[in-house]
Image (cartoon, helix red, strand yellow):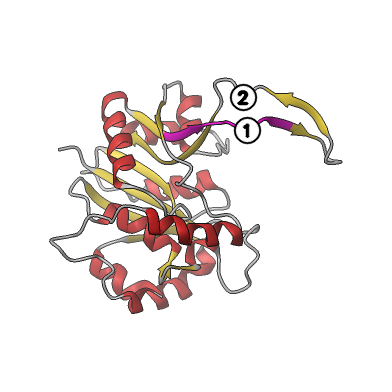
Amino acid sequence: MAKFAVILLAAGRSSRFHDKHYKKPFAPLAGRAVWLHSAERFLNRDDVCQLIVVISADDHESFHDKFGANIAILGMDVVSGGAERADSVQAALAQVRAEADFVVVHDAARPCLADQWIDEVFAAAELSGAAILATPVSSTLKRVNDKQQVEETVSREKVWAAQTPQVFRRQLLLDAYAARAGKQPTDEAQAVEQFGHAVTVVLGSPINLKITSKADLHLAVHLLKAMPKPKTMGGLHPFADDDLWR
């Protein structure tokens, strides 16, 4: 069985979330922090050998105060992120264990993730070496200038909106990031594209939303209720004691 190391990105600035108490990955959602809903989808899998949580260096003290004991029990690793997403991914890649055949990158702020979608993107990555979840764009796209005026209508033909998880053969992603030469790809697929390797697209779902605003957080509460129950570890939910995770 192939082994997967998961990088969970929670180091962003959350500038559009507008909450003085929480960054979006750490905001409470249905009884526990947003990032924990994302983490639990991977912790129960037999094919996941490592989970790395990437946080801002400024958040280390409060993060460990709230979650340190449980992180130690569950065997997660915590890494300091960089100024940009690509810097955070590269920092985490340096900590990926040698036993991992593939690396999975997932946004901590995408808590509404179904096991089926993970299964499908993992399987696609095993076949092609690189695969991401994405959805075809259905809305009309407008390019807008600095005055908030429409400059042109952009064709949506063959345009898809990328999601996470994004999954890559470990050495491929290491090589792609080693070759980026200061470039700041906006996601891991772009880094692999720039390296010259094709990326397979697996149909995702609008339910797999990325929380950006408070409105998204309220929507996620309802979406979680409609999600299938996560797998369990030997019949024990990994976050059975919710009070430890608030």
Q: Position of residue 240 (x, y in %)?
A: 26, 71
Q: Is residue 186 visible?
A: yes
The residue beneath circle 2 is 156
Q: Which residue is under mark 1? A: 139
Give the vertical position of 169 relative to 53 (above or below). Answer: above
Q: Which residues are magenta?
A: 133-142
Is residue 125 magenta-colored? no
Helix, strand or loop under label 1: loop
78 or 20: nearer the viewer: 20
The disc placed on residue 78 is none
Label 2: which secondary element: loop
> Which residue is painted at 55% across and 65% down in the image?
23
Circles 2 and 1, Cβ within 8 Å, touching? The answer is yes
Residue 65, given in percent of the width and then of the height, sits at: 41, 78
Left or right, 147 with reference to 14: right
Q: Position of residue 224 (x, y in %)?
A: 41, 57
